[in-house]
Image: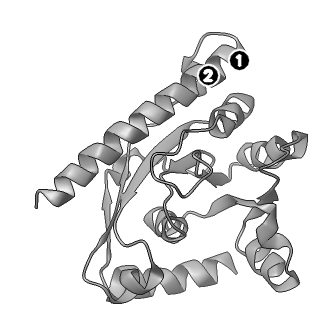
Amino acid sequence: MYKFFASLLYLIIVVIRRKLKVIDKKYLPKEPGYILTCTHRSMVEIVILALAVYPQEVNYMAKKELFKNKFMNGFFSSVGAFPVNRENPGPSTLKTPVKLLKENKTVGMFPSGSRNEGAPIKKGAATIAVLSKKQIVPAVYQGPLSFSSLLFGKEKAVIQFSPSIDPNDYDMSKAEAIAAITRDVDARMKMMSEALEKKITEK
């Protein structure tokens, strides 16, 4: 199901409508098995991030409330998403993404855990990176915030990737590494987001 939906959306948004610009795709690992983090202000980023790494697949962490409905549970599960309890995160919150990464599958995360611009970065991505020993590839997004604007508006969706952050480069305790990686991901994404926004507004 994932390949079907991703291929369909890629055809419509990228090939036909030409609404996606990807900057620095060279920083993406050639093989899956890494963590993608991205800014998050709307549901559009979920689609754009998947299209930006296409034909690689992304397994998204999604809040458990989205899986309560039987139909939505089937849909999200079929496209590679898995539920997490954001209010009371337990061992399974980390177990599933770590398992996926060790199976060389890519995990998509929105580390602010919120669609509010400027929300603080949470430590989930860094924790998963340290436990799985897999690198994080930060990304930032600028563009339409609704699917109607994405499909029918004039504004292009722009996503930019940065060099990866490798947990194996942090020679310190797990707790210290998690804190340091969280700070580095936060700083990297803020710097990139500000630079990309400035670049677009100056055009």
Evaluate whether residue 163 shows in this view.
Answer: no
Q: Secondary structure at mark 1?
A: helix
Residue 196 x %, y %: 26, 51
Q: Residue at x 25, y 44 (%)?
A: 195
The quadrant the C terminus occupies is bottom left
Q: Quadrant of the N terminus?
A: bottom right
Question: For the point 35% across and 83% down, which residue is it?
Answer: 15
Three-letter amino acid code of the residue under disc 2:
Ala
* Three-letter amino acid code of the residue under disc 1: Ala
Mark 1–mark 2 CB contact (< 8 Å): yes
Can you say whether 188 is above or below 55 in the image?
above
Q: Which residue of the protein is positioned furthest toward the top in this rendering?
A: 172
Q: Is residue 186 above or below residue 76?
A: above
Task: Name which residue lies at 55% across and 70% down.
Answer: 43
The quarter of the displayed image where residue 172 is located = top right
Q: Tell me how far mark 1 sits from mark 2, CA to CA.
A: 6 Å
Residue that carries the numbered disc 1 in the rendered image: 175
Residue 179 - label: 2
- Find numbered disc 2 in the image and state the secondary structure of the residue it sits on: helix
Q: Is residue 157 left or right of residue 124?
A: left
Q: Say which mark, if any, is on residue 77.
A: none
User: Where is residue 112 shown, x and y percent of the image?
Assistant: 57, 46
Q: Quick one: label 1, few (<14), some, or many (20+) residues within 10 Å?
A: few
Residue 113 left/right relative to 151? right
